[in-house]
Image: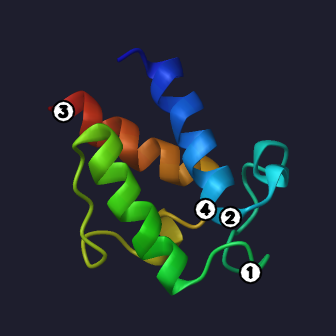
Amino acid sequence: MAENSVEERMLELIEEICDDEIIREERDADLFEEGLLDSMAAIELLVAIETEFGVTIAPTAVEREEMNSVNKIIYQVQIRYDAQ
């Protein structure tokens, strides 16, 4: 899957889970601080990432600060996807 395909699919997943299209415009905003993501939604996102890309990110494997924005989430998925 091409890098831009991963990015676009991740945008779709995050938008669906956050239920707000603002995530496409505010890609560096802290999703937790903005109230767009909570701990349950974060787990839902991790499950969706594993289902969609075969990439497993354990909740304890990364700090919240490493996955609190759209761009950071995409980066974490991309580096793991590329390593497969």
Under mark 4, the amino acid is Ile
Question: Residue 75, percent across and down?
Answer: 46, 43
Between the C-alphas of marks 2 and 4, the distance is 4 Å
For the N terminus, the quadrant is: top left
For mark 3, what is the residue? 83
Comes first in the chain, label 3 or label 2: 2
Secondary structure beneath label 1? loop
Q: Which of marks 4 and 3 is nearer the N terminus?
A: 4
Marks 4 and 3 close (CB-CB < 8 Å): no
Mark earlier in primary sequence (1, 2)? 2
The label on residue 17 is 4
Q: Which residue is drawn at 61% across and 62% down?
A: 17
User: Mark 4 packing: few (<14 Cα in 10 Å), some, or many (20+)?
Assistant: some
Q: In which quarter of the image is residue 3?
A: top left
Circle 2 residue: 18
Identify whether 9 is placed above or below 51.
Answer: above
Count of numbered marks: 4
Asked if disc 2 and disc 4 are in contact, CB closer than 8 Å, the reply is: yes
Q: Going 55% across and 48% down the picture, which residue do you hit?
A: 13
Within 10 angstroms of label 1, few (less than 14), some, or many (20 or more) residues?
A: few
- Can you tell which mark lies on residue 33? 1
- Residue drawn at the location 53% of the way across and 75% of the way down: 41
Residue 83, position as x, y percentages in the image: 18, 33
Label 3 sits on a secondary structure element that is helix
Relative to 62, is 37 on the left or the right?
right
Q: Which amino acid does label 2 sit on?
A: Cys
- Three-letter residue code for mark 3: Ala
